[in-house]
């Protein structure tokens, strides 16, 4: 990394646009927020991005039940925690800074774009804190939250067992009440990110297990807090709790974050919430993790775009079909080739469109954490699987374009883009695969609410079109958007009808439905961004009030409008392919 | 690997179908061919598939200019060569077996599906032989061909330099005539597959270089044969020729095949063909390699399908939405979930559809190598970039589905599918990226022939529809195919018109045009396969002549028809998205 060609620069300009120009109710002076955002950006750019490749090549090692992180990853985590970043959106009561989720979403994206492997432990720790805050006893809160938010202790989610991933109902780990009012936890868990590492003093595992004679399935699961180390008689947290890491996975990517197999052999566990209601607390964690994972997809698109753009400006190869562009060079920079531009723009509209969706979800999260309406909650519930499923799939596509733009060099480790491709591949798998998100969206969130959640969103689409009926400049986009605002509920009704006759029709349509929903949802946000940009440009032309943010300049706004056109013309047509596919039904899936 | 759950089984049934039922002129008894095919299958299944993961984890090492292969890869190559597989479709004159390209395409697919890294060296060596046969002097042929075809010597293609990949005109390597009538070659080449290895006694490099004062660009390139070792005074091939491997790439995949940086420091080179006409010989090699690479994409889809199918039958997770399927288990095998079936079928239709396209190209190759018409050559020229570009892209998608079907386990090395994903990623890059194939297709092959090559193919589509006008059973497929047989030339004319005004319109449409062409081309082959299968089923019902192949049974034929429906209903709609995108044009690519 050099100053002239940094590995990664946080997309502050676009974040300013979203935080300051796109939010309905941002009359408040949020200079403080922007200052915090800038500090996060500097940290990620200077401390995290430069060690990303090193962490990948060094990986983690397991010896005698203890995992060692790559040394610079360990140091970076500790410096991150000491700077107080862990508790950004956590309550001040426990040492957090109580800043909004909109800001946390930006910071989350920045962290993951700079260093995917790094970003996981803070995110998981904060999710564990949310479960403790939401469902834990006061004693548990008092004992654990401050230390976890300070990052001296970290947290994990222990759900998966070797025979059950998506199907938590199959969990076999057991919890036996003990004489002192706690539980003895026994069982093996796999795929536990940072289940063991040497960057924090203690690791607080949240473990799903089954109390004896509990009902079968997920209604018999309870959640337990199981520290790796307990307090000894002298008050020190050094007494072993029969929790050990018995293996780490050799995997395709995120080498700098250990994926652990954990054994709980009579470990002391503390019940979080009530017996047999563990799944509620777990889902609360999981929904937040899903939004976080969506931002990983966005960050992957952004990082892929940046690396590709930089390479495309630099690398010369062949002359432009429309004539020589760089007379002083023996070939033209490949950014002049239309197909390279197509790939760059695809990455860019996924990054910026996904970021707008993520920001909107974060706003809803802020609202629902305060006094949000039922509508806000329903909308957030519906948009979460779209954001997670769609943005992570688009992240993979962006990373693949990055390799393609780099040509053969993209296949070589030195380019750095193959690591993005490998690391990012996890995002469509963990926190529920794309297929699981799709079933959640169509089955539970849309059909399960008789389409009410969907109508909240399509009404927003409709309103946007209505409010801008006279907008000549964005008429093409709005006409298209209006079409989808009608088509989406219509096809949902048709699917609902088919599903009543045969439940397998839901699974037969769900993936295409998710992707359709993703493309249409991003179209809404691209239309809004174009309209806002146009308004700001018009205001400036008319000498009226212009952008609140100093970084949002004319070039940026014009770019937004042009990129919206690219999105509508080049990307949105994919929704049509998914519509055609999803409407065909279960019958063509019968013969494999 | 166990016998009950093999790593890979060659898809002989489908190959029999293509070789025996789908070829117009196979009255000849080709039992011999099928015997050879079966032997190739056994070799790949027993010797290559089982060492695929080991080769990946061991990788190659470079020491003192000499690369060492993973020991079992070296042994496998030598056993392959000794068994006479190298020269399968090579002339008997030089020790080959002179078998048709249709068979060689099957064998090529089998090799790459079993072990991608292994398959590269034989393929490159045979391509080098083709260039020597087509353009070399008798002396060169006498000296090199037999040994290369025996596999005691191997071959490479040395084109790329660090500053030029797609743009061969930028090549700087130089060739200086020597007093003895040869040339002294100087320059550095990168990305040379198997540029150094320890499995063969000598390595014959075909090197593109520039003779002093040659014209600029590709018209100044000459092709040279540069052996790593020369004959010494005693007649032994052990004299060093100033050719050295100065580095091997650390890359994402194909670890068992070394990607070498080669230095030629005054190496003795022998001109192949004429000075400044090297590109012709190189293109001859490259076209064959592109078809071979297409089969790598097909093999990747097949292997991904097989591994996914086996896992999906075995892995239990959640109950089917339409009710319990496996009462004796605590959850249903995931193959019962419609979205898993969608992914499996997608892999399957890419494998079998791509295989049919590859077989057709191989037939054309057989024809053109004998006394093919100009039409056959034009058709082959046009289908080559489609096969290469489309089938490799679809291979990546299939491998990605394999990971998705395996869930989190797919990200772990042990599953084996992440290796497919990494290894296969090279196929859309080497032998010309997808973007290069797309430009070749639309710019050179289609618009460059004023659409004549395309008309040869769309006429075939039209004829198929016409001949089956009364086919009620496949009417839905044929109606759709007929639509595309008209739409494809129409939109090509429109693009041609735009390109006359602005050449950048070609690049702006080319990728979508390639993908559109790929989806439509596979639709043609799926329709043909469905029609043939239906005919065979009808014949059997009517007590008439049935399938020539014993392995092509009723279940297989019914499956073909059902899978064709899946292709037309679920996959072909993507062509529409590409059509919509490609017709928008250059204007939306201007603002990045």
Image (tube, coloured by chain):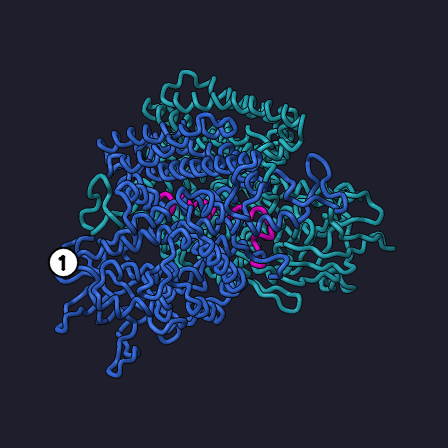
Chain colours: A blue, B cyan
Total count of labels: 1
- Chain identity of mark 1: A
Q: Quadrant of the N terminus of chain B?
A: bottom left
Q: Quadrant of the C terminus of chain B?
A: top right
Expressed as whole percent of the image width and height from the top left, the position of residue B565 reads: 38, 30
B359 vs A297, nearest the viewer: A297
Q: Residue at x 29, y 38 (%)?
A: A453
Q: Is residue B87 visible?
A: yes
* Residue at the top extreme, as displayed: B470
* Residue at the bottom extreme, as displayed: A234
Give above or below for A372 relative to B562: below
A367 vs B376, nearest the viewer: A367
Expressed as whole percent of the image width and height from the top left, the position of residue A463 reads: 37, 31
Expressed as whole percent of the image width and height from the top left, the position of residue A413 reads: 56, 58
Q: Residues within 10 Å of mark 1 (few under 14, many from 20)?
A: some
Residue carrying label 1: A214
Q: Residue at x 14, y 58 (%)?
A: A214
Q: Which residues are magenta?
A: A386-414
Q: Residue at x 34, y 32 (%)?
A: A459
A112 vs A503, nearest the viewer: A112
**Which secondary structure class fits the magenta region best?**
helix
In screen coordinates, is B550 left or right of B296? left
In screen coordinates, is B35 left or right of B281? left
SS category of the residue bearing label 1: loop
Residue A78 on the magenta segment: no
């Amino acid at each position: 990394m050099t100053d002239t060609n940094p590995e990664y620069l946080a997309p502050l300009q676009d974040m300013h646009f979203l935080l300051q120009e796109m939010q309905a109710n941002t009359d408040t002076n949020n200079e403080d927020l922007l200052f915090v955002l800038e500090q996060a950006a500097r940290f990620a750019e200077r401390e995290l991005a430069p060690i990303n490749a090193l962490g990948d090549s060094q990986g983690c090692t397991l010896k005698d039940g203890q995992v060692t992180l790559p040394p610079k990853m360990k140091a970076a985590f500790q410096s991150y925690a000491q700077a107080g970043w862990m508790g950004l959106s956590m309550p001040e009561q426990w040492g957090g800074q109580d800043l909004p989720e909109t800001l946390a979403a930006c910071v989350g994206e920045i962290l993951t774009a700079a260093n995917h492997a790094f970003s996981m432990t803070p995110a998981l720790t904060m999710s564990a804190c949310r479960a403790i805050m939401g469902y834990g006893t006061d004693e548990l809160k008092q004992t654990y939250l401050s230390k976890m938010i300070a990052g001296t202790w970290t947290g994990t989610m222990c759900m998966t067992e070797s025979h059950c991933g998506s199907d938590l109902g199959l969990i076999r780990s057991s919890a036996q009440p003990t004489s002192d009012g706690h539980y003895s936890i026994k069982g093996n868990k796999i795929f536990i990110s940072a289940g063991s590492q040497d960057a924090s003093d203690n690791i607080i595992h949240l473990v799903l297990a089954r109390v004896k004679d509990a009902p079968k399935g997920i209604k018999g699961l309870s959640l337990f807090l199981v520290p790796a180390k307990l307090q000894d008689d002298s008050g020190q947290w050094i007494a072993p709790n029969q929790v050990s890491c018995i293996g780490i996975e050799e995997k395709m990517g995120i080498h700098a974050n250990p994926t652990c197999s954990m054994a709980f052999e009579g470990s002391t566990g503390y019940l979080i919430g009530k017996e047999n209601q563990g799944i509620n607390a777990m889902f609360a964690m999981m929904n937040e993790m899903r939004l976080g994972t969506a931002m990983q997809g966005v960050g992957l698109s952004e990082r892929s775009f940046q690396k590709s753009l930089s390479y495309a400006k630099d690398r010369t190869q062949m002359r432009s079909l429309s004539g020589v562009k760089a007379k002083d060079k023996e070939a033209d920079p490949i950014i002049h080739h239309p197909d390279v531009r197509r790939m760059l723009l695809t990455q860019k509209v996924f990054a910026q469109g996904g970021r707008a969706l993520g920001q909107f979800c974060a706003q809803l999260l802020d609202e629902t954490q305060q006094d949000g309406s039922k509508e806000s909650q329903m909308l957030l519930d519906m948009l979460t699987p779209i954001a997670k499923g769609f943005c992570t799939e688009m992240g993979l596509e962006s990373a693949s374009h990055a390799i393609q733009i780099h040509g053969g060099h993209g296949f070589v480790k030195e380019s750095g883009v193959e690591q993005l491709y490998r690391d990012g591949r996890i995002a469509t798998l963990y926190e529920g695969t794309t297929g699981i998100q799709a079933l959640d969206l169509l089955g539970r969130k849309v059909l399960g609410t008789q389409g009410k959640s969907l109508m909240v969103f399509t009404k927003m689409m409709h309103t946007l079109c209505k409010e801008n009926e006279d907008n000549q400049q964005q008429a093409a986009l709005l006409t298209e958007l209006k079409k989808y605002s009608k088509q989406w509920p219509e096809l949902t009704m048709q699917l609902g009808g088919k599903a009543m006759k045969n439940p397998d029709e839901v699974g037969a349509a769900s993936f295409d439905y998710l992707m359709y929903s993703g493309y249409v949802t991003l179209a809404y946000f691209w239309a809004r961004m174009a309209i806002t940009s146009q308004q700001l440009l018009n205001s400036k032309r008319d000498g009226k009030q212009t952008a609140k943010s100093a970084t949002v300049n004319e070039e940026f706004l014009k770019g937004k409008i042009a990129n919206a056109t690219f999105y509508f013309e080049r990307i949105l047509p994919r929704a049509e392919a998914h519509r055609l596919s999803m409407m065909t039904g279960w019958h063509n899936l019968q013969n494999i």
